[in-house]
Image (tube, rainbow, N blue to C red):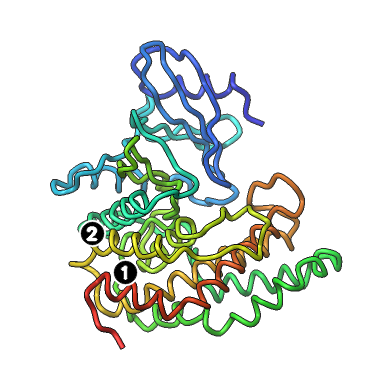
Amino acid sequence: MVTMKDVQFISNQFCVASNLESVAPLESGHINDTFLIVTKNNERYVLQKLNANVFNDVVSVISNKVNVSKHLLKVQDSKYETITFIETKDKAYYHMDNNGDYWNMMSFIPNSNTVSVANNEKLVFEAGKLYGDFISQTATLPAIKIKETLPNFHNVPLRFSQFEIALQNTSESHKGDAMEAIEFAYRCRDEMFRLAALKEEGAFPMRIVHNDAKLSNILFNENDEGLAVIDLDTVMPGIVHFDFGDSIRSICTNMVEDDGDFENVSIKLDYYEAFCRGYAESTGSILTPQEVKYLPLGAKTIIFIMGLRFLTDYLNGNTYYKIKYDTHNLVRCKNQFKLLESVQLHYDEIQRITYEAYGLDIS
């Protein structure tokens, strides 16, 4: 358990201009512990403890983040801001505490806010432009500088294998409660393996991708204009489809992933179109026709992966994601699988919108 006294001590290991005035926890995703640091000079920083149970090579995770940040700062044609990382007094970009936990500190971008739920098409369009810009700008970053810190992160065959192991070892009560979701996972299995097969065949170029491109990992200003991409923990080499898909999953739905009103979960086609237009504006000159063709399948696949991961964690006894109640991960799973059903229902329209946004006629 991290105390405020611990956070204050750790903050003082970094090169900040003045003594701390206050520390406050920030709600920031399912994995890490994050805090807002305010100094007596009213400077603000974000301090984060990385979850070593998730990241086996935390030093490489931090190295990836710093290298991407430094690259983006050098880019001349991007209008967006970049999170910068603060060195420690020992000239490192992380501090390891007495428990062996790793911490890093980042700049705080003023007059910015995060959004959990999209409420207008302008914001969705801006999100598409910003995440597309990230793909465009990292295209010139030498891949050798970025390590694969979470191998097979979006590998559906591996995730399905993990799910089946959890299914074998779970309690009968958990299995019974999750039976509808379990059966749905098996029905989708063959189609959801398709992108992994195409990747192995070399059908797509490998890019430096965010790998957690959800709405809450963008900073906006008060006018709903995109400012910066944040949370670079999962930046790795990969294919663009999973970034695109995670954005669609988190932005173009009418309900958050924790909502238990499953029957009314659906894809918002107007938001999907707005996001595609923004994404195409930033990536239209770099994505190949083959990449564009399979963007809609990327949306299907990442929704499935997230639903399957929530289901697996529930069957394993909730050991990975932070939860607020015992069936929280099962609720998340059912929510995602209902969203996938909606995408399946509207898939022809989703394909049409995607291809038109890129000005392509792909049959």
Which residue is rendered at x = 75% and y = 47% of the image?
325
Q: Where is residue 36 in the image (x, y as percent from the top left)?
A: 47, 27
**Residue 135: image location, x then y, percent:** 28, 59
Q: In which quarter of the image is the C terminus?
A: bottom left
Picture quadrant of residue 337: bottom right
Q: Name the residue under label 2.
A: 282
The amino acid type found where label 2 is placed reads Ser
Tell me the CA gap for discs 2 and 1.
Answer: 18 Å
| Above or below for 352 versus 227 | below
The amino acid on which the numbered mark 1 sits, given as a three-letter code, is Met
Residue found at x 48% / y 50%: 57
Q: Is residue 70 left or right of residue 338?
A: left
Kindly tell me whether residue 79 is visible in this rendering. Answer: yes
Which quarter shows the N terminus?
top right
Residue 109 against residue 332 in the figure, above or below: above
The reply to whether residue 92 is in sight is no
> Judging from the image, what secondary structure is the residue with disc 2 in?
helix
Disc 1: which residue: 206
Question: Could you say where residue 76 lies in the image, as x and y percent from the top left?
Answer: 13, 46
Q: Compare residues 115 and 104 and report the one nearer the observer.
A: 115
